[in-house]
Amino acid sequence: MKLFFDTSVLLPCFLEDHEHHEASLSAFLKTDKEQGSCGAHSLAEFYATATRLPGKHRLSGEQVMLFLENVRERLAIVTLTADEYYDALIEAAATGVVGGTIYDALLGRCAMKAEADYIYTWNVKHFRQFSPDIVNRLRTP
């Protein structure tokens, strides 16, 4: 079974006091590069989010890079070609995707490229507006 990890699942793996830490970490530790993947964009999204967490939870760039190295060791990183990226934008525009939800649409495309059986996300609502091919694969860890 192939699994695709959304950023909303990856970040809690490394934040012990996060409400989704245990479930996210359990799913993460049960996979490897043969079965698990994430989008390249998730690495940047993880970095941006973790370095802007509020107060004592904020992580330094160096700390985040250590966590991202763990992600890279365990998961295959999926990228889109320029044409795949543009096609995803065309489809998003045609279906009414607006704002930051475009990043979830791009991750959905990465999941399909990876031939993921399941897309692990805590943001199921964000992905529900996409094609049935994506919606039918949504799971929480």
Image: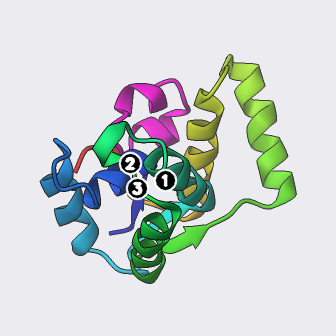
Q: Which secondary structure, mark 1? A: helix
Residue drawn at point x = 36 percent, y = 53 percent? 11
User: To which residue does mark 1 refer?
Assistant: 46
Tag in front: 1 or 3: 3
Q: Is residue 124 magenta?
A: yes
Q: Percent position (x, y) of residue 74?
A: 39, 79
Q: Is residue 96 above or below residue 10?
A: above
**Residue 126 included in the magenta stretch of the image:** yes
Give the magenta part as a residue range: 120-137
The tag on residue 58 is 2
Give neighbour class at mark 2: few <14, some 14-19, many 20+ (Cα, 10 Å). some
Front position among marks 1 and 2? 2
Residue 129 at x, y percent in the picture: 51, 24
Q: In the rendered image, which quarter is residue 2 located in? A: bottom left
- The amino acid at mark 2 is Arg
Q: Amino acid at mark 3?
A: Leu
